[in-house]
Image (cartoon, rainbow, N blue to C red):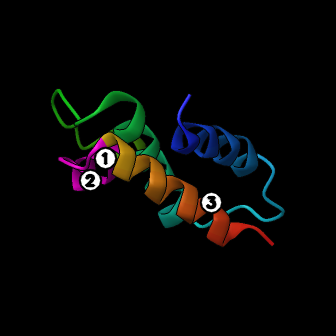
Amino acid sequence: MSELKKQFEVALADSKKLSERPSNDVLLQLYALYKQATEGDVEGKRPGFTDMVGRAKYDAWAAVKGTATDDAMQRYVDLVDSLKD
């Protein structure tokens, strides 16, 4: 396992143990970077107007479309590190 992959796994665990809940914007960034790192570019149709949460998640993920897996992992690790006490 690469060093970055290990850091990403640690950041995933750390993100669940943060002392304060991040803002919704930060949570969407975490979601988008996680999905980009683990699944690649967003696919499918954007959720409809009535699914506001799904729509926000889709838009956040679409905003990082084209980001390389390693870059998305590093950005996730850096973001989680910045949220720690």
Image position, residue 62 (x, y; %): 23, 48
Q: Please give the label number shown on residue 15.
A: none
- Of tags 2 and 1, which is closer to the observer? 2
Identify the residue at horizontal 27%, vertical 51% (top origin): 59
Answer whether labels 2 and 1 touch (C-beta < 8 Å): yes
- Of tags 3 and 1, which is closer to the observer? 3
Q: Which residue is mark 1?
A: 61
Distance Cα–Cα, label 3 vs label 1: 17 Å
Q: To which quarter of the image does residue 39 belong?
A: top left
Q: Which residue is mark 2?
A: 64
Distance Cα–Cα, label 2 vs label 1: 6 Å
Answer whether labels 3 and 1 touch (C-beta < 8 Å): no
Left or right, 61 with respect to 75, comes to left
Helix, strand or loop at label 2? It is loop
Identify the residue at horizontal 56%, vertical 55% (top origin): 77
Q: What amino acid is labelled 3 in the image?
A: Val
Q: What amino acid is labelled 2 in the image?
A: Val
**Quadrant location of the N terminus?**
top right
Which of 81 and 65 lies nearest the eye of the viewer? 81
Identify the residue at horizontal 23%, vertical 35% (top origin): 42
Q: To which quarter of the image does residue 24 belong?
A: bottom right
Helix, strand or loop at label 3? It is helix
Q: Please give the label number shown on residue 80.
A: 3
Image position, residue 82 (x, y; %): 63, 71
Mark nearer the N terminus (3 vs 1): 1
Identify the residue at horizontal 81%, vertical 73% (top origin): 85
Magenta stretch, residue numbers: 57-68
Left or right, 35 with respect to 17, comes to left
Magenta span includes 67: yes
Left or right, 61 with respect to 18, comes to left
Left or right, 83 with respect to 4, comes to right
Mark nearer the N terminus (2 vs 3): 2
